[in-house]
């Protein structure tokens, strides 16, 4: 009788939501707080840079300066995450972002903020995120049973998107009281996030660590290179978002095209996350388990079309809706890509493979911001985004031809 009772108590915990696992819940809450802090920081930093210089090129440089360390440190970051406690790595990254926000707070309060300071701190943020992204991706599988991982990844993405909605919106409104007020709030969010991460307990222990060799250092690259479906999925996302992303140009659209202030910028930055949140909640309840390839390519094509609508719009509401569609479409790609990577990767290699994946993500985001800023300097913001939307549609057509196995993929787990 007692054994039946114990089984009855344990079963719901294993078969219900991943949030029924305490450590995953702490990870989930920590990710919300950390992402909110990062998003508020980027809203204030981007708006402050544009106020200081009025330059699209400088807005692009902020993204490039964050991407450069991520690219240079990716292999090292992957190995660090496979050889050291991922909870401590993630907490250290949050602490470094806390320091950046504190420096910006002091500099803004003392009227010392400058283009050079913002670009220097962008480099520091890039270092933090080089280690943070693979730590976050490789940590989640240790906190839930394998059969709950796809739902856990969808819920984790939902947390991130909810924070991306709330963070820019709050940051935009708080900016009315000055950039210093935003930076002060950011410091608080990073402290809260680090506190949640520090209390995580692994549900499943990591596998034994491999000795450091040149072969193990490049193992993540080799793993991805020899799996065309995984390579196709993450490279599709890379080039689609790199070309089609308009995030770096949102201060220009807010000020010069749509004629709204920091509050409007906050809403524009949060709009993609609003669409992504709705889709991630849907995916957490109804995971995609059939016709995965069709879903993936259809979503990326929709992303490109919505980008073109945003470029053509001069109406604030239409622009918000178009950005929301881009976020929802991108979320489908994110969940499919992350599920493929995590389900096919042994835990002992997850840090290194996640680091390779983070290069693609960082390139699509930070390097994409530089590409947007550079083309906007030549073509203007509208021309830059139009070119990006058309480029995304071209990438979809090419990848369907070059990666037919991915285009015809039916299930996530039949590699």
Image (spheres, rainbow, N blue to C red):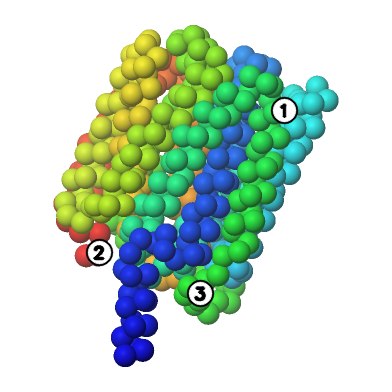
**Residues tagged 3 and 2 counted as in contact (Cβ below 8 A):** no
Relative to the observer, which residue lies in front, 261 or 73?
261
Q: Position of residue 345 (x, y in %)?
A: 39, 67
Q: Position of residue 76 (x, y in %)?
A: 60, 59
Rendered residue at 29%/49% (across/down): 283
Relative to the observer, which residue lies in front, 326 or 114?
326
Q: Give the distance between the C-alpha atoms of the residues marked 3 and 2, in whole angstroms.
A: 22 Å
Q: Nearer the viewer, mark 1 or mark 3?
A: 1
Crowding at dot 3, Cα within 10 Å, few <14 / some 14-19 / many 20+, comes out as some
Relative to the observer, which residue lies in front, 410 or 173?
173
Rendered residue at 35%/61% (across/down): 17
Q: Give the distance between the C-alpha atoms of the residues marked 1 and 3, in whole angstroms.
A: 41 Å
Crowding at dot 2, Cα within 10 Å, few <14 / some 14-19 / many 20+, comes out as few
Rendered residue at 48%/59% (across/down): 25
In the shown orientation, is residue 279 left or right of residue 23?
A: left
Q: Which residue is mark 1?
A: 180
Residue 312 occupies which quadrant of the picture?
Answer: top left
Q: Which residue is mark 3?
A: 206
Please tell me whether residue 279 is drawn above or below residue 383 in the rendered image: below
- The residue positioned farthest toward the right in the image shown: 110
**Residues tagged 1 and 3 counted as in contact (Cβ below 8 A):** no
Q: Nearer the viewer, mark 2 or mark 1?
A: 1
Q: Give the distance between the C-alpha atoms of the residues marked 2 and 1, in whole angstroms.
A: 48 Å
In the rendered structure, which disc, 2 or 1, sits on the residue that comes first in sequence? 1
Rendered residue at 34%/83% (across/down): 5
Q: Which residue is mark 2?
A: 413
Q: Position of residue 321 (x, y in %)?
A: 33, 24
In the rendered structure, which disc, 3 or 2, sits on the residue that comes first in sequence? 3
| Helix, strand or loop at mark 2 | loop
Crowding at dot 1, Cα within 10 Å, few <14 / some 14-19 / many 20+, comes out as many
């Amino acid at each position: 009788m007692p054994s039946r009772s114990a089984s009855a108590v344990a079963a719901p915990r294993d078969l219900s939501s991943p949030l029924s696992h305490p450590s995953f819940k702490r990870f989930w809450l920590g990710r919300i707080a950390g992402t909110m802090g990062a998003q508020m920081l980027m809203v204030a930093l981007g708006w402050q840079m544009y106020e200081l210089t009025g330059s699209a090129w400088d807005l692009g440089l902020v993204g490039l300066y964050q991407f450069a360390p991520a690219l240079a440190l990716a292999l090292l970051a992957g190995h660090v995450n496979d050889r050291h406690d991922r909870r401590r790595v993630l907490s250290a990254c949050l602490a470094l972002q806390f320091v950046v926000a504190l420096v910006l707070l002091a500099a803004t309060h003392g009227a010392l903020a400058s283009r050079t300071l913002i670009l220097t701190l962008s480099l520091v943020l890039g270092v933090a995120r080089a280690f943070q992204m693979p730590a976050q991706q490789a940590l989640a599988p240790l906190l839930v049973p394998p059969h709950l991982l796809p739902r856990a990844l969808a819920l984790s993405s939902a947390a991130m998107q909810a924070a991306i909605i709330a963070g820019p919106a709050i940051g935009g409104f708080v900016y009315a009281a000055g950039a210093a007020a935003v930076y002060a709030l950011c410091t608080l969010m990073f402290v809260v996030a680090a506190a949640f991460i520090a209390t995580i307990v692994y549900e499943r222990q990591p596998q034994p660590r491999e000795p450091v060799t040149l072969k193990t250092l490049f193992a993540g690259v080799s793993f991805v290179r020899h799996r065309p479906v995984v390579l196709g999925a993450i490279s599709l996302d890379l080039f689609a978002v790199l070309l089609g992303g308009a995030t770096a140009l949102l201060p220009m659209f807010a000020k010069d095209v749509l004629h709204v202030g920091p509050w409007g910028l906050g809403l524009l930055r949060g709009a993609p996350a609003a669409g992504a949140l709705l889709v991630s909640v849907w995916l957490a309840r109804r995971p995609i388990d059939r016709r995965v390839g069709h879903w993936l390519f259809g979503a990326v094509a929709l992303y490109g079309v919505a980008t073109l609508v945003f470029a053509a719009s001069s109406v604030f509401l239409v622009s918000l809706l178009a950005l929301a569609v881009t976020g929802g479409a991108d979320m489908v790609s994110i969940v499919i890509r992350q599920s493929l990577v995590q389900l096919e990767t042994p835990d002992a290699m997850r840090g290194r493979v996640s680091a390779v994946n983070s290069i693609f993500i960082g390139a699509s985001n930070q390097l994409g911001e530089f590409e947007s800023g550079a083309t906007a300097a030549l073509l203007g913001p509208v021309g830059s985004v139009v070119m990006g939307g058309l480029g995304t549609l071209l990438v979809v057509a090419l990848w369907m031809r070059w990666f037919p196995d991915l285009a015809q993929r039916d299930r996530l787990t039949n590699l």
